[in-house]
Amino acid sequence: MLKDKIQTALNKQIELEASSSQFYLAMASWSETLGLTGTSNFLYKHSDEERFHMLKLVRFVNERGGKSLIPQLSQPPKEFDSLSNIFELLLEHELNVTDSINNIVDLCLNEKDYTTYNFMQWYVSEQMEEEALARTILDKLHLIGEDKGGLYMFDRDLETMAQSLSNEGK
Ligand code: OFO
């Protein structure tokens, strides 16, 4: 049985993962309207991944005899300043998610809930990957600057990354 404190923390994480999914969906849609097909496909996939992260938590809480709360979400932004702005926001958001995951891991140790502690290790490694990916993408964008040809290549690169996200079956 889940302790109340752990259940509350996991339900907060469910909300955070759900809002990540909505946030990236808004970014995907914005990029699509600019004709950035590769970028939008990448972000649509990323949004799906976040939904998967949320679902994994929902199922875990219920399986442990708790009750998942399906959250109401606030509307994500409709507009973004630029492509760099999107990935800066994405990295900032992922850093917050990592903090939140680390707090849950701490709480599990304090509460001696080793089952949830083990379950959360998947999220710990996932966060490492997501932060690294966001940093790589931002580095590429900084290299490109205002170069239109570079932007075209960047968008194609993200299409390839989107394919590899689907191949991982996330
Ligand atoms: Fe769920 O990893 Fe990003 O937010």
Image (cartoon, rainbow, N blue to C red):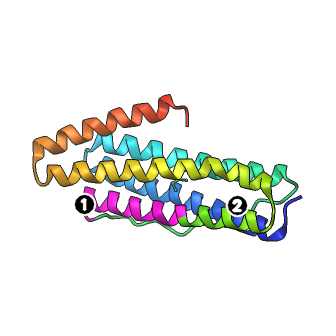
Q: Inspect the magenta stretch and tell me whether residue 89 lies in it.
A: yes
Residue sitting nearer the eye, 44 or 111: 111
The residue carrying pointer 1 sits among few (fewer than 14), some (14 to 19) or many (20 or more) residues within 10 Å by Cα, namely few
Q: Residue at x 79, y 55 (%)?
A: 114
Q: Residue at x 67, y 53 (%)?
A: 120
Point out residue 41 in the picture as x, y percentages from the top left corner.
Answer: 38, 40
Q: Quadrant of the C terminus?
A: top right
Quadrant of the image occupied by residue 4? bottom right
Q: Residue at x 54, y 45 (%)?
A: 49
Tag 2 secondary structure:
loop
Residue 30 in view, yes or no: yes
Mark 1 or 2 closer to N-term?
2
Q: Is mark 2 within 8 Å of ligand 1?
A: no
Residue sitting nearer the eye, 152 or 105: 105
Point out residue 14 in the picture as x, y percentages from the top left corner.
Answer: 65, 60
The residue beneath circle 1 is 82
Point out residue 109 in the picture as x, y percentages from the top left corner.
Answer: 74, 63
Q: Residue furthest top?
A: 167
- Horizontal side of 2 relative to 37 (left or right) equals right
Tag 1 secondary structure:
loop
Quadrant of the image occupied by residue 78? bottom left
Extent of the magenta region: 81-98
Point out residue 125 in the picture as x, y percentages from the top left corner.
Answer: 55, 48
Q: Inspect the magenta stretch and tell me whether residue 143 lies in it.
A: no
- Identify which amino acid the numbered label 1 is placed on: Ser
Q: Is residue 169 shown above or below 116? A: above
The residue beneath circle 2 is 70
Q: Residue at x 40, y 50 (%)?
A: 132
- Identify which amino acid the numbered label 2 is placed on: Ile
Q: Which mark is residue 99?
A: none
- Horizontal side of 109 relative to 36 (left or right) equals right
